[in-house]
Image (cartoon, rainbow, N blue to C red):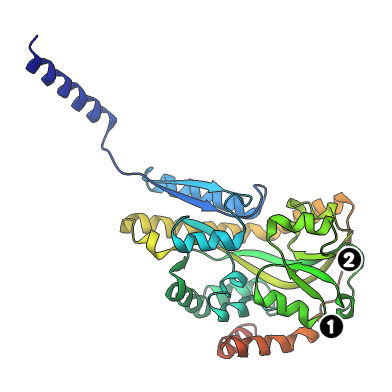
């Protein structure tokens, strides 16, 4: 067999293999990082997004989910998304307020009449305007709005019944201006600590309290290092999958559409399931032996309503606050 004939046979064989394998395409891997455990509602949503995106893109888009703070705390993850070292992350309005102060009003204490009121705000003109301001300022693109739920107060040494019970209490809060100001207004000592360090901070008495959802209380085993769960329900919190304009512009229009529409569907499914999941978290917490206390919200609402006006004025968002109140029937 001549060298030329052998070469032709090799080329034919390679072409035949390629035809059998089907048309080639470039794969893009989307890494989605978050700071929460694999048992969290947000991780379930991330896995669902992975399922939808990979199926709808025919494999062109692949997703890798990185939970549990593998790439840092929430702030570090969002900074990574902004810089382009991570494709997607899990953020929330309190964190975005570090870039666009007006975002802070979306997590003001006792602002919403319920989840329906919250949804009308984030899905409407207010939420769209805030998202556009964030993209203009940072290049970050909010892919959806998820309901993280009401936040309560976990304490090691006291029961919270009235605003006065917060006096001088060292409480862990997220790295967010609205949380810091909320607990300062209650005469507490708010202490920003990254999420992966909360358990140790409570265990070593660096702080004597934390605030968060029942999901966080259970999945992060806060019941092991606190004695009381006080249902202050002080903030109705959002969450969102966030990417960057820089990353999106590197995708085809079709794949951009697949990613964003899939994220919107995931948010719809997550919201629908949230209240049932919240009830399950409270049941699980009760089984741990932590003492759960009902709290009358009215004294807290009265004490913190002035903060809404002050915060909105500082953030240049008085008109948005008035619109939110109007949507709630005030």
Q: Which mark is residue 325?
A: none
Instruction: Specify which label sits upstream in the sequence, 1 or 2.
Output: 2
Does residue 220 appear to the left or right of 76 in the view shown?
right
Give percent across and percent down for residue 103.
Answer: 57, 77
> Which residue does the image show at 56% across and 88% down from the upper left?
316
Crowd band around label 1 with a 10 angstrom C-alpha radius: few (<14), some (14–19), many (20+): few
> Which residue does the image show at 59% across and 85% down from the upper left?
315
Label 2, secondary structure: give it. Answer: strand
In the image, is residue 105 above or below residue 10? below
Label 1, secondary structure: give it. Answer: helix
Crowd band around label 2 with a 10 angstrom C-alpha radius: few (<14), some (14–19), many (20+): some
CA gap, disc 1 and disc 2? 16 Å
Does residue 97 appear to the left or right of 113 in the view shown?
left
Discs 1, 2 touching: Cβ within 8 Å: no
Q: Residue furthest right?
A: 158
> Which residue does the image show at 52% across and 80% down from the upper left?
126
The residue pinned by badge 2 equals: 293
Instruction: Indicate the quadrant containing the C terminus: top left, top right, bottom left or bottom right.
Output: bottom right
Q: Who is closer to the viewer here, 225 or 41?
A: 225
Give percent across and percent down for residue 91.
Answer: 57, 64
Q: Which mark is residue 299?
A: 1
Does residue 67 appear to the left or right of 22 in the view shown?
right
Is residue 207 in sight in this rendering? yes
Q: Residue furthest top?
A: 1
Give percent across and percent down for residue 111.
Answer: 68, 80
Does residue 17 appear to the left or right of 199 in the view shown?
left
Is residue 241 in sight in this rendering? no
């Amino acid at each position: 067999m001549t060298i030329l004939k052998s070469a032709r046979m090799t080329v034919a064989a390679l072409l035949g293999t390629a035809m059998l394998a089907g048309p080639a395409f470039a794969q893009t891997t989307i890494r989605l990082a978050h700071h929460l455990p694999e048992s969290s509602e947000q991780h379930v949503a991330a896995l669902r997004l992975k399922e939808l995106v990979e199926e709808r893109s025919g494999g062109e888009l692949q997703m890798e989910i990185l939970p549990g703070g593998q790439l840092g705390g929430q702030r570090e993850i969002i900074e990574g998304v902004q810089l382009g070292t991570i494709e997607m992350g899990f953020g929330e309005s309190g964190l975005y307020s570090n870039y666009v102060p007006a975002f802070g009003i979306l997590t003001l204490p006792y602002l919403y009449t319920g989840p329906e009121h919250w949804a009308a705000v984030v899905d409407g003109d207010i939420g769209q305007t805030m998202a556009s301001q964030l993209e203009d300022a940072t290049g970050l693109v909010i892919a959806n709005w998820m309901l993280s739920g009401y936040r309560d107060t976990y304490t090691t040494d006291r029961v919270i019944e009235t605003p006065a019970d917060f006096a001088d209490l060292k409480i862990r809060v997220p790295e967010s201006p609205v949380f810091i100001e909320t607990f300062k207004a209650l005469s507490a000592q708010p202490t920003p600590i990254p999420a992966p360090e909360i358990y140790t901070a409570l265990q070593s008495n660096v702080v004597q309290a934390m605030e968060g959802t029942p999901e966080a209380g259970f999945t992060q085993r806060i019941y092991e290092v606190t004695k009381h769960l006080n249902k202050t329900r002080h903030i109705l919190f959002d969450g969102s999958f966030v990417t960057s304009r820089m990353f999106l512009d590197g995708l085809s229009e079709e794949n951009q559409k697949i990613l964003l529409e899939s994220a919107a569907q995931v948010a719809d499914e997550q919201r629908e399931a949230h209240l049932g999941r919240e009830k399950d978290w409270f049941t699980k917490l009760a089984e741990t032996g932590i003492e759960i206390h009902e709290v009358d919200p009215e004294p807290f609402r009265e004490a913190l309503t002035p903060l809404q006006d002050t915060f909105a004025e500082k953030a240049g968002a008085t008109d948005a606050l008035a619109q939110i109140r109007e949507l709630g029937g005030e």
